[in-house]
Image (tube, rainbow, N blue to C red):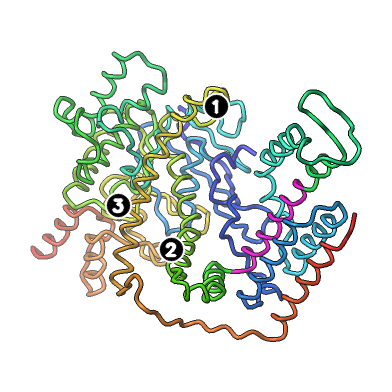
């Protein structure tokens, strides 16, 4: 039995502690993520998701509780923070805002250069990262960053983080604001990173379709606490849970719930469009 | 504290409003601003120890009257300490010739330290703190909208000499409004770049070029974001029919009452006392 790659125990965080504006963002949060898992964190704005993920690469240090990532203790002031940030690649919301170099290749190379790698290895990593996100190295590396489309910029930003070769990839609303095509493509890329490259993926999302498609396990956050945890099948199949925490459902699940309300016998635990379609076909055949 | 490494936006007190609903909060912003200007002028002129101690005491009392915890003022002073120290050193070294008089304690070459130059140094430091305290009270007790409305009205008469009072007030409003926004953007940018290996302020302080280069990954995106936001703002204003220079009506009307006049009179009295204290 191996220990989880991300192990958060009783993590609490209060913003502006000791002022009239103090706000408890995290309240005894515990999550465990195994190597190679794909985890979704869902919850309303202000439920503490962003605060939680910023603890994973040491942008924030635990006020109380423990965060251990791949054996590195984030609460230890002597921990090698740069090593930690290399192991946990954190991609913020709208990461395309962070591009600053003139050329695509240079921007992706920023992280590896900062690691002090020799130029040949930097080049190799940039090429690797670009191919992973679906940008052709030869074609795109010398394009100016400002001339890219929104979806391409986001891929460049993602490649910039991947070039660090992290073990854990943390994404904050990776597809927000993308058009459906870019969204689907990005999701497929993330899935491949998880399945083929064996990257542990943790992502925050408001899009339940996305959660249903990608995640093996889901953590639901509310008021700075973990409200519940389980597989998408468990979460989306439990209507009282959904109502209690005001969780939206994928459209496929919505249809099944509506059918059930109408008195049809359907399995509401099916949450992928294909499964829902199969359920409906079954109904028609009967 | 390590966890506060990137908490920029939470440390900025400019434009932060702390609603405690005190007497000071409820004052007419025009009068509050006028009283503030009077006090600042008095502080700028007053060059005596006791006068400045008195002013300092008044400033601290202002926090109590406006029900704002004093540490809000202190947190404004903290980042200014290096400047105060540099200023004091420069004044001590180079102002001896200008601030002549009093007993000379020390003289070597061009460096003259006398009781007058020491007074200048100490009084300047106190002035610094007083000004920070007063402006903290002003901004913490007045929302930015009130502040700019007040300023616009006070400057109103200048319109007669073709001074663009409204445009000026608008510029100030926008500038103050976007301080916290850009602080947040900058915080986000620092975190994003740190996540891919950037480090800030770890280079030796004399390697200015390297440290400046370290900031480029933050500054360039920040400019991009600022320009994008400016464009959005223009669109939003034009969508609501804003016309530069067009005549505008106001929906807020201020009516001063006894308290407001009293506040202004009190501030004048305090200023006069400050200036008349002879030591």
Q: Are marks 1 and 2 on the same chain?
A: no
Residue B3, image x, y percentages? 59, 40
Q: Chain of mark 1?
A: B
Q: Which residue is mark 2?
A: A245
- Residue stretch in magenta: B124-142
Vertical order, A248 against B122 (above or below): below
Give yes or no for residue B138 being in the magenta stretch. Answer: yes
Give the structural element (helix, strand or loop) at label 1: loop
Which residue is at the front of the view, A33 or B264?
Answer: B264
Asked if the stretch drawn in magenta spans residue B139, the answer is: yes
Q: Quadrant of residue B45?
A: bottom right
Disc 3 secondary structure class: loop
Measured Cα–Cα span from mark 1 to mark 2 = 44 Å
Category of crowding for the residue at label 1, using alpha-carbon neighbours closer than 10 angstroms: few (below 14), some (14–19), many (at least 20): few
Label 3 sits on residue = A176
Q: Position of residue A74 (x, y in %)?
A: 55, 33
């Amino acid at each position: 039995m191996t220990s989880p790659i991300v192990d958060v125990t009783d993590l609490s965080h209060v913003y502006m502690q000791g002022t009239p504006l103090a706000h408890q963002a995290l309240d005894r949060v515990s999550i465990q993520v195994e190597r190679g898992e794909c985890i979704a964190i869902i919850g309303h704005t202000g439920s503490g998701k962003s605060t939680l993920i910023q603890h994973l690469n040491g942008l924030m240090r635990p006020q109380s509780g423990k965060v251990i990532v791949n054996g590195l203790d984030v609460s230890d002031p002597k921990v090698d923070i740069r090593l930690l940030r290399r192991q946990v690649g954190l991609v913020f919301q709208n990461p395309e805002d962070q591009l600053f170099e003139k050329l695509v290749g240079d921007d992706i190379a920023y992280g590896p250069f900062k690691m002090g790698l020799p130029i040949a290895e930097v080049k190799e990593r940039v090429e690797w990262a670009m191919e992973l996100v679906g940008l052709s190295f030869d074609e795109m590396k010398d394009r100016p960053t400002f001339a890219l489309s929104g979806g391409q910029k986001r891929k460049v930003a993602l490649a910039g983080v991947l070039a660090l070769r992290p073990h854990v990839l943390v994404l904050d609303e990776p597809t927000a604001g993308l058009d459906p095509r870019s969204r689907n493509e990005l999701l497929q890329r993330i899935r491949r990173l998880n399945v083929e490259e064996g990257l542990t993926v943790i992502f925050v999302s408001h899009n339940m379709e996305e959660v249903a498609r990608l995640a093996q396990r889901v953590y639901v956050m509310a008021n700075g606490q973990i409200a519940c945890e389980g597989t998408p099948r468990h979460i989306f199949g439990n209507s009282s849970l959904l109502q209690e925490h005001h969780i939206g459902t994928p459209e496929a699940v919505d249809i099944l719930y509506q059918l059930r309300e109408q008195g049809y016998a359907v399995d509401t635990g099916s949450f992928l469009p294909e499964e829902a379609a199969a359920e409906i076909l079954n109904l028609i055949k009967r | 504290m390590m966890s506060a490494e990137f908490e920029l936006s939470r440390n900025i007190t400019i434009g932060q409003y702390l609603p405690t609903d005190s007497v000071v909060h409820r004052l007419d912003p025009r009068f509050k601003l006028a009283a503030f200007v009077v006090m600042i002028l008095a502080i700028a002129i007053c060059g005596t120890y006791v006068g400045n101690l008195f002013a300092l005491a008044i400033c601290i009392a202002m926090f109590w009257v406006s029900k704002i915890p004093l540490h809000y003022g202190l947190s404004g002073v903290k980042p200014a300490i290096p400047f105060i120290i540099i200023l004091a050193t420069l004044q001590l070294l180079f102002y001896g010739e200008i601030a002549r008089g009093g007993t000379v304690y020390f003289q070597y070459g061009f460096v003259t330290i006398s009781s007058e130059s020491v007074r200048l140094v100490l009084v300047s430091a106190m002035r610094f703190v007083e000004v920070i305290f007063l402006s903290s009270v002003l901004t913490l007790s007045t929302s930015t909208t009130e502040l700019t409305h007040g300023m616009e009205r006070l400057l109103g008469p200048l319109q007669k000499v073709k001074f663009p009072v409204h445009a000026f007030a608008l510029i100030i409003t926008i500038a103050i409004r976007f301080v916290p926004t850009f602080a947040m953007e900058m915080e986000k940018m620092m975190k994003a770049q740190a996540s891919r290996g950037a480090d800030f302020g770890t280079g030796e302080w004399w390697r200015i070029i390297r440290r400046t280069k370290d900031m480029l990954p933050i500054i360039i995106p920040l400019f991009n974001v600022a320009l994008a936001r400016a464009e959005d703002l223009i669109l939003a204003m034009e969508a609501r029919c804003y016309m530069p220079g067009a005549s505008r009506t106001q929906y807020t009307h201020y009516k001063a009452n006894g308290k407001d006049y009293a506040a202004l009179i009190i501030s004048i009295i305090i200023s006069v006392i400050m200036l008349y204290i002879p030591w």
